[in-house]
Amino acid sequence: MSQKPGAPQLKTVQYESTVADFVQKTRGRFLASTEDQVFLFVLRTVLSKHLGLPLLDTLHVVPDPADIPRAIQETITAKRFPFLLMEGKLGDQDTAFMVKQFKTAFPDMLVLILTADVERHRIIHLHESGANSFIAKPVSALTIIEKLAFAIKPHGQLGQLIDMAKSLIQQGQPEEAKKTAQQILQVKPASAAGLMALGDAEAELGNMDAAKAAYREASAGTPLYMEPLRKLALLAEKSDDLEECLTYLEQLDKLSPLNFERKVSMGAINLGLGNEEKAHTLFEVAMGQATKDAIDQLGVLAERVAELYAEKKPEHAEKFLRKALEAKNKRLSRDDIRVFNRLGITLRRQGKWAEAVDEYKRALVLDPNDEVLHYNMGMAYMEGEKPREALRCMESAYTANKDFLKSSPNIAYNMGTVFAKNGVKDKARDCFESALEQNPRMRQARTALDKL
């Protein structure tokens, strides 16, 4: 069937209207994090000449990715709706992790990724992290208008019904969402979006078998669509079916192998199922990916792995924590003190109190007044039967933050024990009294206070 003359022009007018309304009625603002001057020239031309929008208030260029969070916050403070356009590759920074952070903090924000030669797996990872759309460079003015419009508002009856179904789920109206999902499937049978909406509605209604059936049909019809598998994995996890959950996670991992956080989840399940060697391999791969793509997240990742190994295999926990610290090397910051503290505790569990002290000393270079470090080092010295050294550490913790006593009755009691052992009765009394204020039934604190 031949297309009517003027149909493409009509669509272009609709797209232009959608983008203009986003700025004028929704109070949207575009944030462009790129140094590509050709793309910026075309974007400015689209906004100012094609759409007649004032550039000063419509477009904010953010060349340094580190400034993106501030630009987003300023946009929201000004009661504007942010639409972020950012490069798929930003030097050595992990764009996928950044997108996930932004979407976690600002779930409604739109994100469009600019790509040139980004590989398929990274595109999939970016989409999984929350990117709404992608645009391949070099790009024409018409393509920019179309991509912006589709990210802002789905066009046609089907897109509007999909939006309505999602909105009804968010509003806590699953029955109405189910009816809308059935409408979508009448318009387009086997629609993946319609099946996902139906699955979400059934899950909210507590019909788990029906929800699984809808998600499985959506996945079977669109093998590269990750959302059905993710929902199936979540349902399996909620029903404590770890083997089924692992099956879906493994399928997701084949589609998007760069998601190192998922590999940790897979490792945790394998560990719970007794597959220790497989779990260890997954943790190793996850750490390797994080070292390459998101080095700033290594500490958080290592802590998760260490927590899984904490009781049964502290030597493995130690290994992963040390890897994280070694990988960061000269980029260590105060944020890494948590990792040092975790490493120290792991070493103490193995009886390596002196090594723990060495790690606490390394961490104190990052912040000499961190009361938690001083306290943990004092506990390590007590385990090594060095009460005088322990006293110096507890004195430092006490001086750095007297309210530290109030953070836990056990901390207060332990500090009091060190002070009492060294004859510092006034501070020992403070500590034991603080422990009893927090836990009046703490017998050992009452006994220690009576002895004073």
Image (cartoon, grey):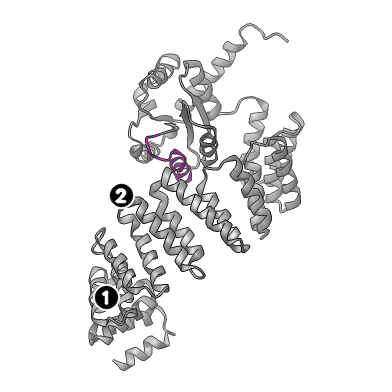
Instruction: Write down the region rendered in magenta.
Output: 90-105
In the image as oriented, which residue stretches furthest toward the bottom?
451
Image quadrant holding the C terminus, namely: bottom left
Residue at 40% from the left image edge and 39% from the top image edge? 76
Q: On the image, numbered disc 2 is attached to which residue? A: 331
Q: What residue type is labelled 2?
A: Arg
Residue at 47% from the left image edge and 59% from the top image edge? 304
**394 left or right, relative to 79:** left
For marks 2 and 1, give the CA distance.
Answer: 29 Å
Residue 19 rendering spot, x and y as whole percentages: 49, 23
Residue at 34% from the left image edge and 56% from the top image edge? 336
Q: Which of labels 2 and 1 is toward the front?
A: 2
Q: How many marks can you see?
A: 2
Residue 403 rendering spot, x and y as whole percentages: 30, 71
* Of pointers 2 and 1, the one earlier in the residue sequence: 2
Q: Vertical placement of 336 versus 182: above or below?
A: below
Residue at 70% from the left image edge and 8% from the top image edge? 2
Badge 2 local density, few (<14 within 10 Å), some, or many (20+)? few
Say which quarter of the image contains residue 393: bottom left
Query: For residue 390: magenta?
Result: no
Q: Vertical placement of 264 versus 15: above or below?
A: below
**311 left or right, relative to 233:** left
Residue 303 rendering spot, x and y as whole percentages: 44, 59
The label on residue 11 is none
Q: On the image, numbered disc 1 is attached to which residue? A: 394
Residue 404 seen from this side: no
Question: Quick one: SS at disc 2?
Answer: helix
